[in-house]
Image: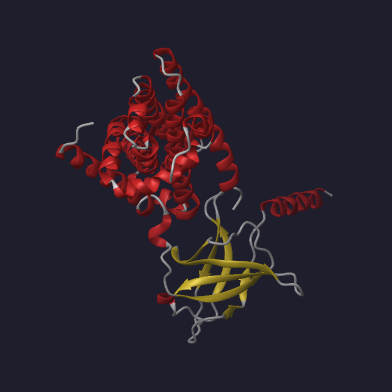
């Protein structure tokens, strides 16, 4: 095959377009831009139940994402779920009486941890724990209780 | 590497074709001009078909996805649906199938004809190793082009889905991008799709080159080899896709 400068230029453009496409996919279409390891500190919370919560689930306060779930473990003595959250370092002024609850985004959406800041003057620091928690609402349980109550009232 | 004698060669070559080709890859590095020419005929000439197919596949995904998702009031997740299906499956698979049809068949026909017109034997007479000179640059070109083509395919598809979704059907384009970015994972989705496209590019070029090199040197033989290239590539790509998907996308 004869070679020409046009051909070389086209090869260059092709490679550039391909790499641009891959960059676009990485940066614009996926979460690469948001998982660049930002400085964060760890806060743990004990829940009666963390059903549906996963590692990487969002942690938000007032609807703003402030971090993500880093690990979920079962406490072998109390049988509670210990959820460790990585909170962005810039949100280091959350009061230490913050309430953590597990909410659902929408009716069938993902579970996330919602932080409700309290009024204390001391702030949450690395490896501190949130004491006031509210477990995940399990729909089946709620429906079960509702049916049970309805049956009680009929008697 | 000294090449073995002709009788042994005719037995060795088809069986260790891949090994011989891979060992020839190093000599390509010394001759970038050969690679550049092949990148042109394998990559650049496949670009247009990949671009246009990607656009239409993305637009169709946008339409179909919208019809289903709007039943559940979840049109906002259209971006995620289009992007996830493109990045994980359709991008690598469809572009590999198109690649096999567009570039693979051309490679087989070219090499088959070279064999039929005894150009390959001519090279051997001049002590030029046809595997190093002809086959290896083409394999490397296929291996390099395929991920780029798949990346272009997915990108254009996502933009095509956005054109239909937000231009025609009125999905909010902010939500289109936001849902995509929130749910697609770089390592789980983009990197796995990339690995898939590398594997498919390797397999499709390997099959095309082997079929061409192994073709019966008649016009009928070349035509059969070309057909086999397309059929075998399609089978291997789809089969490998299942295996790779099963390995990569477990419940994470």
Q: Residue furthest right?
A: A155
| Residue B88 seen by the camera | no
Q: Residue furthest top?
A: B220
Question: Residue B9 location in percent, x, y?
Answer: 49, 33
All told, the count of numbered labels is 0
| Residue B3 seen by the camera | yes
Q: At 47% across and 78% down in the image, what residue appears?
A: A94
Instruction: Relative to B150, say whether A1 is above or below.
Output: above
Quadrant of the frame with the N terminus of chain A? top left
Q: At 46% across and 41% down in the image, what residue appears?
A: B20
Question: Residue B236 location in percent, x, y?
Answer: 53, 32
Is B7 or A10 nearer to us in this picture? B7
Residue B102 placement: quadrant: top left
Q: Residue furthest left?
A: A5
Is B217 or B181 nearer to us in this picture? B217
Q: At 74% across and 54% down in the image, what residue appears?
A: A145
């Amino acid at each position: 095959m004869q070679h020409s400068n046009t051909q070389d230029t086209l090869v260059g453009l092709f490679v550039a377009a391909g790499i641009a496409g891959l960059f676009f996919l990485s940066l614009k279409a996926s979460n690469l831009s948001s998982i660049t390891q930002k400085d964060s500190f760890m806060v743990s919370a004990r829940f009666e139940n963390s059903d549906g919560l996963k590692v990487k689930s969002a942690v938000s306060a007032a609807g703003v994402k402030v971090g993500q779930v880093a690990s979920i473990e079962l406490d072998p003595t109390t049988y509670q779920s210990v959820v460790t959250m990585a909170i962005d370092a810039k949100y280091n002024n959350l009061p230490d009486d913050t309430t953590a609850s597990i909410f659902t985004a929408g009716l069938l959406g993902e579970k996330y941890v919602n932080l409700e800041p309290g009024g204390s003057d001391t702030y949450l620091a690395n490896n501190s724990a949130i004491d006031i928690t509210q477990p995940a609402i399990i729909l089946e349980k709620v429906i079960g209780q509702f049916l049970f109550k309805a049956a009680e009232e009929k008697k | 590497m000294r090449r073995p004698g002709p009788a042994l060669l005719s037995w060795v070559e088809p069986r260790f074709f891949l090994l011989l080709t891979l060992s020839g890859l190093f000599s390509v590095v010394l001759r970038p001009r050969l690679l550049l020419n092949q990148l042109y005929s394998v990559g650049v000439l496949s670009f247009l078909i990949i671009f246009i197919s990607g656009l239409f596949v993305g637009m169709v995904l946008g339409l179909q996805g919208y019809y289903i998702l709007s039943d559940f009031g979840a049109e906002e997740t259209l971006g995620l649906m289009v992007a996830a299906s493109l990045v994980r499956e359709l991008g690598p698979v469809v572009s590999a199938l198109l690649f096999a049809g567009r570039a693979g068949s051309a490679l087989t026909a070219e090499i088959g004809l070279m064999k039929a017109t005894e150009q390959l034997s001519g090279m051997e007479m001049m002590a030029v190793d046809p595997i190093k000179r002809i086959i290896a640059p083409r394999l490397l070109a296929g291996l390099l082009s395929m991920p780029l083509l798949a990346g272009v395919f997915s990108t254009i598809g996502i933009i095509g889905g956005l054109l239909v979704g937000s231009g025609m059907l009125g999905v909010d384009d902010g939500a289109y991008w936001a849902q995509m970015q929130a749910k697609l994972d770089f390592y789980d989705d983009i990197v796995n799709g990339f690995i898939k496209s590398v594997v498919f590019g390797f397999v499709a070029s390997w099959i095309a080159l082997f079929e061409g090199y192994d073709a019966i040197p008649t016009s009928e033989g070349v035509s059969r080899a070309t057909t086999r290239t397309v059929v075998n590539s399609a089978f291997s790509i789809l089969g490998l896709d299942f295996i790779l998907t099963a390995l990569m996308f477990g419940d994470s």
